[in-house]
Amino acid sequence: MKFHPSESTAPAYWKQACQALSASDPVMQQLIGQFPDIALTSRGCAYTTLARSIVGQQISVRAAESVWQKINRTIPAITPHAIAATDHDVLRRCGLSARKIVYLQDLSWHFSDGNLSGTVWSNMDDQAIIVQLTKIKGIGRWTAEMFLIFHLHRPDVLPLDDIGLQRAISQHYFGKQTVDKKMMHELACCWQPWRSVATWYLWRSLDPLPVEY
């Protein structure tokens, strides 16, 4: 398996999803109109997507990018073997916590040992992939959902635990009042089967800079 990112493109369904969301939800229509020239893209590498997601756990997008760039300067060729072989002190100096170092190296061993294979994901539904990935140390449902959205480009993922999504829904739909998962889930019913796309535009409303895992 190759671990170098490939050139990425927007999902084939993007235009159709935007049209459907705009027709069903005035807020979506407005947000999509604000960002006409950008779309979800992937870095094209399953390992990189999961590694970046682990780095980004419980910190801001900008902080996560800063840490990742430090890793990239320290280890120019980021592969499972390279991360697994890097001393903990080196990774700590990049800004990683001890826990995230363990998570990254455990992920690296899974890829190096061939326990994760992209050839089977296309035949698995979203929940089955979440179950598979969350068996890996440090990968919870949120990280698995980021993988579904950013690497596999699954169109109907709703990451209810995502703080950014919670904030954006609160801001645009509930007058900045606190929202719970039930409220979010009920609101998102009208976005199906394009909840990943709706989520992406709600993220953009908070930070116009597109995120790529």
Image: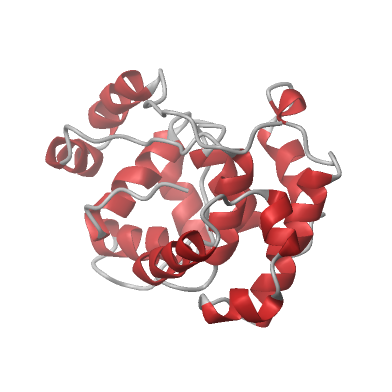
Percent across and percent down for residue 26 are: 20, 39
Say if 46 sits above or below 181 in the image.
above
Left or right for 26, reference 84: left
Percent across and percent down for residue 56 are: 50, 65
Residue plotted at (80% across, 45% down): 112
Figure colour scheme: secondary structure
- Whether residue 134 is visible to the viewer of this picture, yes or no, is no
Residue plotted at (65% across, 32% down): 2
Q: How many numbered markers are drawn? A: 0
Say if 138 sits above or below 107 in the image.
below
Position of the N terminus by quadrant: top right
Residue plotted at (46% across, 70% down): 67
- Whether residue 105 is visible to the viewer of this picture, yes or no, is yes
Percent across and percent down for residue 161 are: 54, 62
Q: Where, by quadrant of the figure, is residue 103 drawn?
A: bottom right
Residue plotted at (42% across, 67% down): 179
Left or right for 43, reference 175: right
Q: Nearer the viewer, residue 21 or 9?
A: 9
Say if 148 sits above or below 177 in the image.
above
Percent across and percent down for residue 28 are: 25, 40
Left or right for 41, reference 30: right
Q: Nearer the viewer, residue 206 or 94?
A: 94
